[in-house]
Amino acid sequence: MPFRVTRDIEEAPAQSGAFAFEVELWPHQSLTGTGFVWVIGIAFGLVCIPLVGLLGTVVFMAILPFAMISVGGLWWSLQRNWRDRDIHETFAMTRDRARLVRIDPDGRRRDWEANPYWLRVERHEKVGQVEHYLTLGGGPREVEIGAFLTPAERRDLERRLLTALGRVKLLPQD
């Protein structure tokens, strides 16, 4: 599952201001470096099979650039996918503050904060092609959370966020 609750409200915060709930989110990462090498190698081999029969002909030189462009396109798309999966989101909550930090693939950091008392976790059934789209409201603007998760994972995340939010509101004042 591409999210992990690193601190839950059931574990009492050790000191004042410590996070009572924290969850980390990241996109699926199913292709390893070894898998990448295998995919490119197999694609290269499959593209070369028809070229073997054309060795020594004029047609070979006409088809070779297109075959290599197709392998290069696969290489580029897999590299782009690897770069896009470098998204990392962290949502943390104390009695007085809820914070979402998103680090984009280009390294840019985006922060959002709100008071948990006013925080709203909303699930939109369908936004365009995205089912069970999750947003957090109550701060300066409404933000999405876990856009890269599957619909089932977003529903599970929503349940965990709502449970933690209810528990944080019951924490004693410092």
Image (tube, helix red, strand yellow):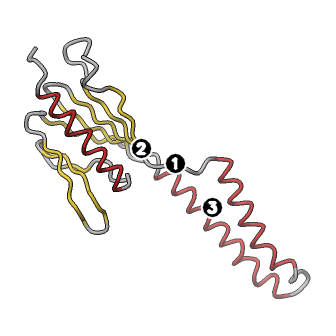
Tell me the residue that label 3 is attached to.
75
How packed mark 2 is, by other alpha carbons closer than 10 Å (few <14, some 14-19, many 20 or more), is: many
Mark-to-mark CA distance, 2 and 1: 8 Å
Badge 1 element = loop
Question: Is residue 151 shown left or right of residue 169?
Answer: right
Residue positioned 19% across, 46% down in the render? 136
Residue 26 percent across, percent down from the top left: 41, 44
At label 2, the amino acid type is Trp
In the image as oriented, which residue stretches furthest toward the bottom?
58
**Badge 2 or badge 3: first in the primary sequence:** 2
Mark 2 and mark 3: Cα distance apart in space: 23 Å
The answer to whether residue 117 is above or below residue 77 is: above
Give the label on residue 26, or none: 2
- What residue do we see at 15% from left, 25% from top? 95
Contact between labelled residues 1 and 2, with CB atoms less than 8 Å apart: yes
Q: Earlier in the sequence, mark 3 or mark 1?
A: 1
Residue behind mark 1: 29
Q: Residue at x 32, y 48 (%)?
A: 146
Write down the quadrant of residue 19 in the picture.
Answer: top left
Q: Secondary structure at mark 2?
A: loop
